[in-house]
Image (cartoon, rainbow, N blue to C red):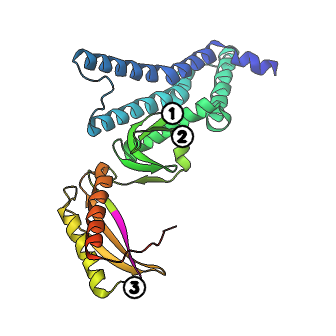
Amino acid sequence: MEDMINKLLTWPVMIYLLIITFAFFVPEMWFQQQSRKKAKRRQQAGLPADNLMNVTETLSQTRFEAQVQSLVFIFAVIVAPFMIGMFLLGDDSNRKELRDGLALAFAGMLVWSLTTGTDVAKAFLGGLSFRTLVAFRKPIQVGDRVTLQEHSGKVRSIGTFFVMLQTENDDLVSIPTHSLWSSVLISANAGERYSLCVMEFYLASFATQAQRQQAEDIIWDAIQASPYLEVSQPMQIYMSQMPLAIQLTAKAYVASTYNESLFKSDVTTAFLNHAAENDLPLSHFLKK
């Protein structure tokens, strides 16, 4: 045990640990400093300091940060010990002990990072890996309207430690980035401006054929009349029989995914107004 400790208390191991420490904290500190400088320039120009960049610029920034952090971490944990070891080549016993200590530190750091590291280290490694995945595969992007771990909203930022969502009520939800590896990721628009909107309407089960046709026509007309409709995409309405109601399901694309609530409100208002004016029998069926 004493020999192992002595092997670890050597200058190559100290340099290796110092490089790893810098790799963990220096890039993040540099990115934060750049953000503060950008906010200061915006304030000097009379603009809000926290105003968001456009989606393309934010996504590019996120990809750049993930690439830098990935490369720095790979260099620190994997490449650095081999570079240090190059200076320890030789057959004398002193150099051999230094190499053994460095190899022991490298193996310990690798096992610690992948298995029993601290929560901060696990969060950092998991978050960094997820950001790297996002940078290259794009399962979600900044600006997407997503559902993550039962929280829905617009992706404001994808950080190493947290993904920030802005809900429809303007709440900010912070989700640990590393936890998303084991989560289902649902993106409504997958980087596109528009997204599919599904609306359900219910008539009483005894509605006549003419009343069912009226309901379908008013839903169709309301969708086409809405200023939020994405006209380049298809739309459809289909009907299904339920035990206590007749369900009409409308599918159409909203031009901006953030206006889905307004789009639904337009169509629903037109449907309810027509139903009230023409005595269409609505169902009191409650969907579970």
Which percent across, then down, holds residue 178?
Answer: 54, 40
Given residues 232 and 282, the one toward you in this image is 282
Question: Which residue in the structure is indicated by mark 1?
Answer: 161
Question: Which residue in the structure is indicated by mark 2?
Answer: 178
Say which amino acid is labelled 1.
Answer: Phe
Q: Residues within 10 Å of mark 3 (few under 14, many from 20)?
A: some
Question: Which residue in the structure is indicated by mark 3?
Answer: 206
Q: Real-space Cα distance between discs 2 and 3?
A: 52 Å
Sequence-first disc among 2 and 3: 2
Which percent across, then down, holds residue 29?
Answer: 45, 19
- Mark on residue 123? none
Asked if labels 1 and 2 touch by Cβ distance under 8 angstroms, the answer is yes
Given residues 33 and 156, the one toward you in this image is 156
Is residue 139 among what the camera can see?
A: no
Sequence-first disc among 2 and 1: 1
Q: Real-space Cα distance between discs 1 and 3?
A: 55 Å
Q: Quadrant of residue 220?
A: bottom left
Is residue 107 among what the camera can see?
A: yes
